[in-house]
C-alpha cells in the first residue's frame, strides 16, 4: 500500500523540521499507511495517487486562502478520496480504526505507538489548516504497565566483548564497536553515524549527533579507545580500507563495512547476534541492551542521574529515571535474599 501526498508531506515535516531519524519517520509512515488502507476499505475508495495529490493540493489552497469567517467549502464535498476522509475525520472514524487494530491483537505498547502517530499527524494537519479539526483530542492512549529496561551483568558484558577475534580487521572493528557501545551508551544509529573527525583521541571522547540532530560530547573509556585505535591501525594497512580515512576525508565513516562504506544499523545487529551465539548469551540481547547496561552500571556504581541523562542524550530527566527503578529493584532483591529478617518464613 503506497502512501499519499498528504502523509508524504507529513513525513517530510518529521525529517526536515522535527529532525526525526529515518527509522522513526519510516515507523510513522508504516502506521499511516495502515490507517490509509483501513480507510480505503471502510469507505470503499479506490486509491489513486493522482487523485490524492489533487485533493491534497486543493486542501493546501483552501487552507491558505480561508479566513476565520469563511465556510470550508472543500470539507462539504463527498469523501471521494482518502485525503478528504482524513481531513474530515471525526473521533468515531478514529475509534473504528482503533477497534480494527484491537481485533488484530496488537500489544498495548504497539497500540500506544500507533495512537501516538495519529496524534502527531493530526496535530500537524490541524495546525496547518488541512484538517477540519483534531479528532485525536477525544482519543485516550491506553494505559501501559511500566516496563523496566533490560540490562545484562558486567560478567556477561565482559564475555561478549571478548568474543570478536583480533587477527583480522573486521574482528577488530567488531570489538571496537561493542566496546564503544558499552563505554558510551550510544544508540546504534549514533554509532553508525560517527565520522572519522568525531573521534578525539587526545580528549578521549566522541562527538555524537543524537536525536533532533543535537550534538553532545561523550567520554570514551580507555578500553574502548584502545580497541578503536587497534582497529584503525590494522584498517589503514588493509587494502580494503586503507583509503577510508585521511585529512581529505574527515567525514568518512568511523566504522566501515567490508567494502569501506558506512556500516548500517542492521549490520551491527547481525554482528551482535553472531557473537551472542558464539559465547552462549541470550539471543534477545540487542545493541540497545548495551545502552541500558551502560546506564544501569553507572547508577549502580554511584553516578548521579543528571550525568547519566547527559551521557545518554535524554532530553527529559524523567526518561532517565526509569533506570533508578531498575537499580532500586536490584537493591530490594539483594536485601530480600541476604537479610535474615527481610521476609517472613
Image (spheres, helix red, strand yellow):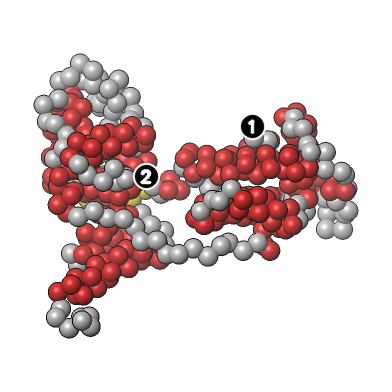
* Displayed quadrant of residue 296: bottom left
Q: Residue at x 74, y 32 (%)?
A: 47
Residue 128 appears in the rendering: yes
- Nearest-to-viewer mark from 1 and 2: 1
Which of 220 and 339 lies nearest the eye of the viewer? 339
Question: Which quarter of the figure is the N terminus placed in?
Answer: top right
Residue 209: mark in rendering: 2
**Secondary structure of residue under mark 2:** strand
Residue 327 spot, x, y in % from top left: 26, 66
* Displayed quadrant of residue 40: top right
Q: Residue at x 52, y 39 (%)?
A: 26
Task: List the residue tagged with mark 1.
Answer: 2
| Crowd band around label 1 with a 10 angstrom C-alpha radius: few (<14), some (14–19), many (20+) | some
Q: Earlier in the sequence, mark 1 or mark 2?
A: 1
Residue 280 spot, x, y in % from top left: 20, 41
Question: Which quarter of the figure is the C terminus placed in?
Answer: bottom left
Amino acid at each position: 500500500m503506497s502512501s499519499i501526498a498528504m502523509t508524504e508531506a507529513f513525513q517530510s515535516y518529521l525529517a526536515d523540521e522535527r529532525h526525526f531519524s529515518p527509522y522513526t519517520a519510516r515507523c510513522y509512515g508504516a502506521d499511516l499507511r495502515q490507517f490509509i488502507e483501513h480507510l480505503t476499505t471502510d469507505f470503499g475508495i479506490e486509491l489513486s495517487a493522482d487523485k490524492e495529490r489533487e485533493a491534497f493540493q486543493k486542501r493546501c489552497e483552501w487552507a491558505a486562502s480561508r479566513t476565520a469567517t469563511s465556510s470550508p467549502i472543500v470539507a462539504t464535498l463527498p469523501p471521494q478520496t482518502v485525503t478528504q476522509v482524513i481531513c474530515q475525520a471525526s473521533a468515531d472514524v478514529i475509534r473504528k480504526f482503533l477497534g480494527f487494530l484491537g481485533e488484530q491483537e496488537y500489544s498495548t505498547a504497539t497500540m500506544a505507538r500507533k495512537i501516538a502517530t495519529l496524534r502527531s499527524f493530526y496535530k500537524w494537519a490541524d495546525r496547518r489548516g488541512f484538517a477540519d479539526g483534531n479528532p485525536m483530542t477525544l482519543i485516550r492512549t491506553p494505559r501501559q504497565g511500566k516496563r523496566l529496561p533490560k540490562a545484562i551483568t558486567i560478567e556477561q558484558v565482559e564475555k561478549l566483548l571478548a568474543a570478536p577475534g583480533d587477527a583480522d580487521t573486521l574482528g577488530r572493528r567488531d570489538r571496537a564497536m561493542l566496546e564503544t557501545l558499552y563505554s558510551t551508551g550510544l544508540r546504534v544509529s549514533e554509532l553508525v553515524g560517527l565520522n572519522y573527525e568525531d573521534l578525539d583521541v587526545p580528549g578521549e571522547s566522541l562527538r555524537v549527533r543524537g536525536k533532533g540532530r543535537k550534538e553532545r560530547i561523550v567520554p570514551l573509556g580507555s578500553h574502548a579507545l584502545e580497541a578503536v585505535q587497534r582497529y584503525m591501525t590494522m584498517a589503514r594497512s588493509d587494502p580494503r580500507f586503507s583509503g577510508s580515512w585521511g585529512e581529505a576525508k574527515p567525514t568518512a565513516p568511523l566504522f566501515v563495512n567490508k567494502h569501506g562504506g558506512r556500516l548500517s544499523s542492521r549490520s551491527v545487529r547481525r554482528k551482535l547476534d553472531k557473537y551472542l551465539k558464539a559465547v552462549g548469551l541470550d539471543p534477545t540481547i540487542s545493541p540497545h541492551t548495551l545502552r541500558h547496561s551502560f546506564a544501569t552500571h553507572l547508577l549502580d556504581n554511584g553516578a548521579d542521574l543528571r550525568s547519566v541523562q547527559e551521557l545518554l542524550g535524554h532530553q527529559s530527566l524523567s526518561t532517565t529515571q526509569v533506570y533508578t527503578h531498575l537499580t532500586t529493584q536490584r537493591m530490594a532483591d539483594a536485601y530480600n535474599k541476604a537479610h535474615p529478617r527481610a521476609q517472613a518464613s
